[in-house]
Amino acid sequence: MQQPPPQPPSTAQPASGHTSLSGVAFVIGSCISLQLGAALAMQLFPHLGAASTTALRLGIASVIVTLIVRPKLRGYSRMQWRAMALFGLSLGLMNTFFYAGIARIPLGAAVTIEFLGPLLLAAVLSRRPRDFLWVALALAGVALLGLDSLIGTPLDPVGVFYVLCAGACWAAYILASAKVGQTVPGSSGLALGMLLAACVPLPLGIPGLGNLNWELFGIAAAGALFASVLPYSFEFAALRRMPESVFGILLSLEPAFAALFGWLLLDQPITPLVGLAILLVIAASAGSTISRTPLPQKPTKDGSV
């Protein structure tokens, strides 16, 4: 789920409405990197468990971002600390629930279901009937996943519940990250928020960290790089080269890449119903992006982040 912060308006938007091929390549690279990071993290589940994997990956990512940003620790108002705390809490919960979910259900199905969160948020904020139609289309896609589980391999209901919680946290994360972008200058809010996010899964993850060795740490570090640092860099570069609306449409391809990497790296099958479900959710997300009025930037999950 995979998540970077909203981009500063002064740097995130291109000088014109022109979309370059390099911008498209950066968005596709971000989608690939995110799902590759999630697939790498899943290799750790048998050894560390989902909670320990989440805590380790978020911890490594937060340290990397903190070393790059070098945020100041003093001089923030109570409102700024509150904004960063909500950002960190939503980011930490989103990743915790998402990784708990993909420990039980396929990656492609998980990302598809998780997209209900930001889609519903967009519909609620716009309050236009046609935006609720996009949510209905996405729900139809999720219903197809349910139908596929009835006639094929059942989806674990606990895993589905975890991913739905991750989607709700993704919606909260979008609002919280936009608030941080408005109230905390520079990238200090991102770094401090990620440090706080890493603390969220830690109480559940401490027991499993006793099994950590250098090989597992290397896999976790690679997962942190692919699921956090690289997507943030790629999306920042992409938003310099294309309009935000085009960026959002391309980002809607995430469920397809999740299913692809689940198939390639994790031997998770893509049935015709699952493929159709993913297409419906992609269409709903792209349609919502095209039709809605400008909303807070929908950033990527830091793994689920």
Image (spheres, rainbow, N blue to C red):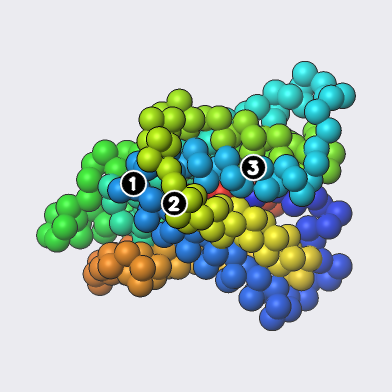
Of the residues shown, which amino acid type is indicated by label 2?
A: Leu
- 139 left or right of 191? left
| CB within 8 Å, label 3 to label 2 | no
Tell us which disc is closer to us: 3 or 1.
Answer: 1
Say which quarter of the image contains residue 275: bottom left
- 188 left or right of 92? right
Q: Residue at x 57, y 40 (%)?
A: 59
Q: Residue at x 38, y 40 (%)?
A: 211
- 73 left or right of 276? right
Q: Secondary structure at mark 3?
A: helix
| CB within 8 Å, label 1 to label 2 | yes
User: Which of the two discs, 3 and 1, labels the residue nearer the N terminus?
Assistant: 1
Using the numbered discs, state the Cα–Cα distance from disc 3 to disc 1 in whole angstroms: 22 Å
The residue that mark 2 highlights is: 216
Local packing at callout 2 (Cα closer than 10 Å; few below 14, some 14-19, many 20+) is: some
The residue that mark 3 highlights is: 62
Q: Residue 221, how many percent across, how many down? A: 55, 53
* Residue 47's disc number: 1
Of the residues shown, which amino acid type is indicated by label 3?
A: Ser
Q: Residue at x 79, y 61 (%)?
A: 13
